[in-house]
Image (cartoon, grey):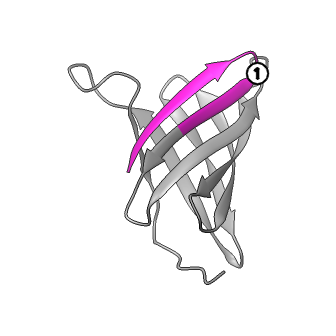
């Protein structure tokens, strides 16, 4: 998955693409405790809810879509990679019919 995120004034926004399709990100985060939550909305398709904790090595947490759920870790690419791009890992893909 390719993902670009922006954190500004306690809001997080972004966009990206993965094996399912194009999506946009809309959510919020706390500078005080590092908690964050957002919705990953696939264009013309379903949405996935995320809740996590932002720390020095990325964002860790859980995702939920319909009856499916799992864990994730989003981390910045190493130096030398494209700027503002992150990768996400999910233990398995869940297909949802909407």
72 over 81 or under it: above or below = below
Name the side, left or right, on which 52 lies relative to 3.
right
Mark 1: few/some/many CA within 10 Å (<14, 14-19, 20+): few
Residue 13: in magenta span: yes
Residue lying furthest bottom: 97
Q: Quadrant of the C terminus?
A: bottom right
Q: Position of residue 56 (x, y in %)?
A: 52, 22
Q: Position of residue 25 (x, y in %)?
A: 61, 43
State the predominant SS element of the stretch in magenta: strand
Going 73% across and 42% down the picture, which residue do you hit? 37
59 over 88 or under it: above or below = above
Name the side, left or right, on which 43 lies relative to 30.
left
For label 1, the residue is 10
Which sits in the foreground, 72 or 10?
10
Magenta region = 1-14
Going 37% across and 64% down the picture, which residue do you hit? 19
Which sits in the foreground, 80 or 56?
80
Residue 48: in magenta span: no
Q: Position of residue 39 (x, y in %)?
A: 69, 50
Name the side, left or right, on which 85 lies relative to 14.
left
How many numbered circles does the render carry? 1
Disc 1 element: loop
59 over 98 or under it: above or below = above
40 over 83 or under it: above or below = below
Going 63% across and 32% down the picture, which residue do you hit? 13
Q: Position of residue 67 (x, y in %)?
A: 71, 79
Residue lying furthest front: 44
């Amino acid at each position: 998955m390719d993902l670009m995120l922006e954190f500004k004034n306690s809001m997080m926004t972004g966009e990206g693409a993965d094996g399912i399709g194009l999506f946009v990100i809309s959510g919020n985060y706390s500078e005080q405790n590092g908690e964050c939550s957002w919705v990953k909305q696939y264009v013309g398709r379903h949405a996935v809810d995320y809740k996590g904790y932002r720390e020095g090595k990325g964002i860790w947490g859980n995702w939920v879509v319909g009856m499916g759920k799992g864990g994730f870790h989003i981390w910045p690419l190493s130096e030398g990679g494209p700027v503002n791009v992150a990768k996400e890992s999910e233990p398995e893909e869940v297909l949802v019919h909407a």
